[in-house]
Image (tube, grey):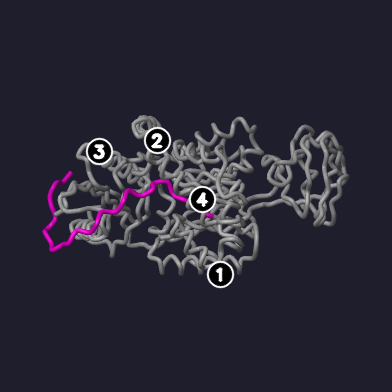
């Protein structure tokens, strides 16, 4: 550890910036929010990253929105990350028509493969493998899981089922089949086609749907980030929960997709699975994005329900790196108000976060890095970040400055949820935008990697110029020895002059 001041320079201290919100906000862009004025207002309201859901619309339309977001963010000087959410093996029923049909409790229905027309008595499912592997007792859900049926008979040309929970079905609703019964792999050929287009457009993150194993993640065949996008594995199947450790090794972050996960697993398990997944993410130094129906009532209402407000706060208390808005911003009545509300809820929960309890938890959960050369480098970074947050606490540091190539140093120290602000410096603009979903990180620009003294001098000067620190403040700096360093191996404590 090295202690010492920087060379003095002429400086007029700006007003200090207020303590930022630490939990990040990922908002889905759709018809209600894709215009330039609304996007600008959402960014100003606190949107840290934008999600493009490719289950709806065309690739060309999504690429145009991506370019619009990127241009607006650059104009506003904000490092807004972009995430493309691949549709995955989505199964739908044949159309019930615009007016729809009622499916009532206790009714018997037939399920057959097809894509022509569905009725109240016979539901055609656009999945050729429907009759292969489904067993008596399996539950199949429609839409968002509100309508549920149980298979009571399997035949050569159809499945027989009884409606457990009925409702009205319109259009072509999604059909949820237990993931272990599916014979469709992820990513699909359409996913890979979409991914190629967005990699060419420089997208920052890609979410892969219906992940079951680490092999599903690796089948994207993208360049490791930051040369390629940060891969976000969506945890929405029982298999993904069972194989979580391997998925975390292969992915850069995870999304807890509570919609399908709540269908796959008993609903009473869902809150506990959320906590388990987030804790495993923290142990591995991976951002965890909690998603689905967080402020669902605000699709139409001007304020959330009390239960939704509590859900957001509890997601923060659980350790979520980011929270996601879906239909609330994609098709809601007032996307900007939704983002403002989410920002207030997260900021208030951040202020009441149990830091001491979290520190004890993370210390217990932290896993050893894997063996081998890469594992040794990761263990060094893990050890240095562990030391850095402890030093920052002991000396009362005003900021932690992380100089990073890939963002891993920032994510590794963020797992401790330090009360000290984290400034993530990188010369890579994609890494800077990827930090938009990393808890507590303020992405900052570094001109390039050089010797340690030059990099640290630039980082502290930038932090000072932009009002994050003042002369007399103490900062903790994590960096490599020079531009060739493969790991974070230098920890310094510096008094700003």
Q: Is residue 162 magenta?
A: no
Mark 4 sits on what residue?
232
Q: Position of residue 284 (x, y in %)?
A: 42, 40
How many marks the image carries: the answer is 4
Separation of residues labelled 4 and 3 (CA atoms): 31 Å
Q: Earlier in the sequence, mark 4 or mark 1?
A: 1
Secondary structure under badge 2? loop
User: Which secondary structure class fits the magenta region best?
Assistant: loop
Dot placed on the residue nearer the N-terminal end, 3 or 1: 1
Task: Locate the N terminus and report the quarter of the image it occupies.
Answer: top left
Residue contact between numbered discs 3 and 2, judged by CB atoms under 8 Å: no
Mark 2 vs mark 1: give the one in front: 1
Where is mark 1, residue-wise? 64
Q: Residue 47 or 460: which is nearer the viewer? A: 47
Q: Which residue is mark 2?
A: 367
Q: Secondary structure at mark 3?
A: helix
**Eyeballing the image, is 335 above or below 475?**
below
Q: Earlier in the sequence, mark 2 or mark 1?
A: 1
| Residue 82 visible | yes
Label 2 crowd bin: few (<14), some (14–19), many (20+), radius 10 Å: some
Q: Which mark is residue 393?
A: 3
Q: Nearer the viewer, mark 2 or mark 4?
A: 4
Real-space CA distance between mark 2 and mark 1, rounded to the nearest whole angstrom:
42 Å
Residue 151 occupies quadrant:
top right
Of the numbered discs in the image, which one, if any, rests on residue 230?
none
Q: Secondary structure at mark 4?
A: strand
Residue under the image location 43 percent in, 61 percent down:
227
Q: Are marks 3 and 1 in contact (CB under 8 Å)?
A: no
């Amino acid at each position: 550890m090295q202690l010492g001041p920087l060379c003095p320079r002429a400086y007029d201290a700006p007003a200090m910036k207020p303590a930022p919100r630490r939990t990040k906000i990922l908002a889905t862009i759709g018809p209600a929010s894709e215009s330039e004025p609304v996007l600008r207002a959402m960014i100003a309201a606190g949107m840290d990253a934008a999600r493009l859901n490719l289950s709806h619309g065309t690739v060309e339309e999504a690429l145009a929105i991506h370019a619009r977001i990127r241009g607006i963010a650059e104009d506003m000087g904000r490092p807004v990350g972009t995430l493309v959410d691949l549709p995955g093996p989505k199964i739908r029923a044949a159309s019930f028509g615009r007016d729809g049909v009622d499916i009532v409790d206790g009714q018997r229905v037939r399920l057959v493969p097809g894509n022509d027309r569905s009725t109240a008595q016979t539901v055609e499912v656009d999945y050729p493998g429907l009759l292969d592997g489904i067993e008596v007792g399996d539950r199949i859900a429609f839409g968002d899981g509100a309508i549920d049926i149980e298979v009571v008979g399997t035949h050569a040309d159809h499945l027989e089922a009884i409606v457990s929970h009925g409702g009205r079905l319109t259009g072509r609703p999604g059909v949820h089949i237990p993931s272990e019964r599916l014979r469709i792999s992820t990513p699909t050929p359409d996913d890979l086609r979409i991914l190629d287009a967005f990699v060419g457009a420089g997208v920052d993150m890609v979410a892969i749907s219906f992940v079951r194993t680490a092999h599903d993640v690796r089948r994207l065949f993208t360049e490791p980030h930051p040369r390629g996008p940060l891969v976000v594995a969506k945890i929405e199947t029982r298999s993904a929960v069972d194989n979580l450790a391997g998925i975390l090794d292969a992915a850069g972050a995870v999304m807890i997709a509570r919609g399908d996960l709540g269908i796959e697993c008993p609903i009473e398990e869902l809150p506990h699975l959320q906590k388990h997944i987030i804790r495993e993410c923290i142990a591995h130094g991976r951002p965890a994005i909690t998603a689905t129906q967080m402020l669902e009532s605000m699709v139409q209402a001007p304020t959330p329900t009390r239960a939704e407000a509590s859900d957001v706060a509890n997601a923060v208390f659980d350790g979520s790196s980011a929270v996601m808005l879906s239909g609330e911003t994609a098709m809601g009545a007032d996307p900007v108000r939704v983002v403002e509300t989410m920002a207030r809820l997260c900021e208030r929960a951040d202020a009441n976060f149990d830091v001491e309890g979290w520190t004890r938890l993370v210390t217990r959960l932290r896993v050893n890095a894997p063996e081998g050369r890469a594992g040794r480098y990761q263990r060094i970074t893990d050890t240095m970040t562990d030391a850095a947050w402890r030093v920052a606490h002991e000396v009362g540091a005003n900021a932690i400055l992380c100089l990073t190539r890939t963002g891993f140093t920032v994510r590794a120290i963020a797992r401790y949820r330090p009360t000290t602000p984290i400034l993530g410096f990188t010369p890579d603009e994609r890494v800077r935008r990827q930090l938009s979903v990393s808890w507590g990180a303020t992405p900052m620009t570094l001109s390039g990697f050089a010797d340690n003294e030059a990099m640290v001098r630039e980082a502290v000067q930038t932090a000072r110029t932009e009002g994050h620190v003042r002369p007399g403040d103490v900062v903790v700096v994590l960096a490599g020895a020079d531009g060739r360093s493969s790991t974070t191996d230098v920890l310094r404590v510096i008094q700003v002059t």
